[in-house]
Image: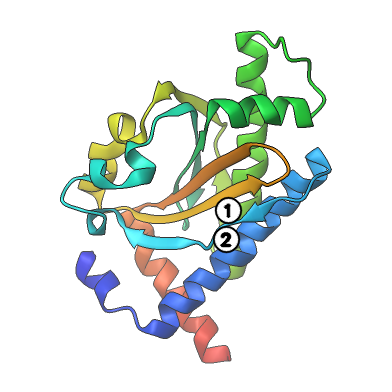
Amino acid sequence: MAALLETLTEDQRDALKELMNIAMGQAADRLARLIDTLVILSVPSIRLATECAPDLSDCPIFSAPSAYITRQSFLGALRGEVLVCFEQDGADELASLMGFDENLNTDEHDELMLDVTNILSSACIKGLAEQLELPASFGAPSILATNSTLFDKVGDVINRDQTLILEICFKVESHSFTCDLLVCVARESLPSVIEAINRMLEDL
């Protein structure tokens, strides 16, 4: 599968990055409407898990500790998982931006993180699936971990499965809110994704 990705042309990589930009932009717009504040996106990153390093622990997004890590699966011709990493300050700011009291209990805080995860992941996966014309459905979001790292929780699985990782950061500059979102496309979905990209390029 690594060889398959290495044969991608520059046009194919650029097309995938543009599709991701559009899908993530839809997710950012959903969040911005929710909190009534401008949300800024980073430049997206596209890579195979095993391209990060021999050990994913060397990759900043996997080694940095997060206050909350959530996950949401997507199934169908486009399948995989969305992982969202929230810093503690960002989680607190998000609660404030959404009008919640500062003294949220654990269950209320978890529910808030899951709501935001569902908003971001469903918007970006729906946008990506529609552009690729690949069916996808969603599982329920869940809390993967608190006060942990992605590497500790999913590093071995992602590395072993040679997952394609689409990574982007959402930021509210007027506040201290940031979160990192990773779309981990399952290995078995990659041929369908590449075939869809080729169809799009042929239509240009």
Q: Are marks 2 and 1 in contact (CB under 8 Å)?
A: yes
Mark 1, residue position: 125
Query: How far across and down, in percent of the image, does residue 204 sit?
Result: 58, 91
Residue furthest to the left in view is 54
**Circle 2 crowding by C-alpha within 10 Å: few under 14, some 14–19, many from 20:** many
Relative placement, left or right, of 199 versus 3 is right
Query: How far across and down, in percent of the image, does residue 192 sit?
Result: 41, 67
Mark 2, residue position: 129
Q: Amino acid at mark 1?
A: Ile
Q: Residue at x 32, y 53 (%)?
A: 163
Q: Residue at x 22, y 65 (%)?
A: 2
> Is residue 133 depicted above or below 122 in this figure?
below
> Is residue 98 depicted above or below 197 in this figure?
above
Helix, strand or loop status at disc 2:
helix
What's the colour scheme?
A: rainbow
Relative placement, left or right, of 157 versus 61 is left
